[in-house]
Image (cartoon, rainbow, N blue to C red):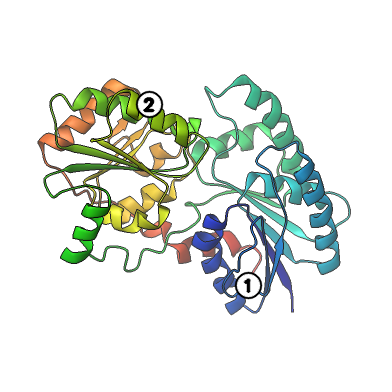
Amino acid sequence: MEKILLIDQSIEDVEEFFIPYINFLKKRGYEVHCVISENKNIKNSDKIFYLQFSEKLFSIKNIKAYKKLKKLIYENNYKFIYSINLIGGTLARLATRKKCNTKVIYATNGLPFYNGDKIKNWLIYYPIEKYLCKFANIILTTNQEDYDFIEKRFKVQNLKKINGFGIICKNSTKKLSKQEIKKIYNHFDLNEKDYIFLSIGNLTENQNHIMQIDAVRRLIFKYKNIKLLIVGKGQLMGYLKFIIEKYELNNNIILTDELEYIPKLLNLTNVVLSTAKAEGISANLVKAMVQCKPIIATDVRGNKELLKQKNLVKNTDELIKKMSICINANKSKEIYETQKYEVENVLQEVFGLYT
């Protein structure tokens, strides 16, 4: 039986994306192995290997992980490796660059550098990607800007644009019961008169939550009943809490790392916000689209393709204007085309070349 290796760093990504991938591949007769950085079980995976990755590319952890991964690849003679993670994709391409029969599919949901990014990121990641791109048998990108950049600047064996990593759309629009809504309201100190904005994403500089906080700070003088829920984990949790308290916004902004509430919060929110400085294809925005939620997002790669200039903003003033329009219109519904982001369709795109 031929073997396939899936690599990721985040257990949240594994549970959301890889389980459908595993099921898809096993139905086609493959033995599926997974590499993750946390000691947790993955449903239906034939084997799980735990390698300690670090988000810092040049680290002792990653050197050790590289050595273990290289040994793993040569021992198992995989038909191909699939990685959606920057670190995992980097180590996989390094490990297979010399005389190896294993094919590598590297999927990037946004290159680690972009127009307007810090010079440091360009100096570090641009030469690394330029060197490693030629060692992947196929590069998958989720947005046109990255596709055009790679095609023009890098030597690649095969380049393909896909519609994200796939979302399970079925049953995602199921309405909450009155009892469930009441529990959510009580848990997050909300009520039915609140106009709710929801922001989902890692608490990092790239997500630019300060822009959202500033918008709410200026809007509450006119709209007392608005609430912003920021849901995510990350290194800026403490800093964002400090800013919210500094401007006395605790009654209007709720910051939580309770990711398990995301599906229900998406169901009852009025508008979804994204103020990222760069994106690939945001799975959270696609989920919002499936639930027909109005979205206000920054005019950056990825978002441009999802929203086609609809409700895109370039700065805080434009964000405030769009938020005000939604509040005044009591807007809570928008229709989108989402079928192409369905996980089954994406899986056919991704693995059609090798399965």
Q: Which mark is residue 322?
A: none
Residue at coordinates 15% horizontally, 24% vertically from top-left?
221
Residue 1 vs residue 269, the one in the foreground: 269
Element at label 2? helix
Element at label 1? loop
Tell me: residue 5, above or below residue 201: below
Q: Position of residue 159 (x, y in %)?
A: 63, 47
Q: Quadrant of residue 83?
A: bottom right
Left or right of 108 in this view: 303: left
Furthest residue in direction right, as rendered: 99
Q: Position of residue 68 (x, y in %)?
A: 82, 56
Task: Verify CB contact (< 8 Å) between mark 2 and mark 1.
Answer: no
Number of the front mark, 2 or 1: 2
The residue type indicated by label 1 comes to: Ser
Q: Position of residue 56 (x, y in %)?
A: 68, 37
Residue 123 vs residue 221, the one in the foreground: 221
Residue at coordinates 20% horizontally, 26% vertically from top-left?
219
Tell me the crowding category of disc 1: few under 14, some 14 to 19, or many 20 or more residues within 10 angstroms, Cα based. Answer: some
Residue identifier under label 2: 243
Q: CA distance from mark 2 to mark 1?
A: 43 Å
Going from N to C along the chain, the mark reached first, 2 or 1, is: 1
Residue identifier under label 1: 45
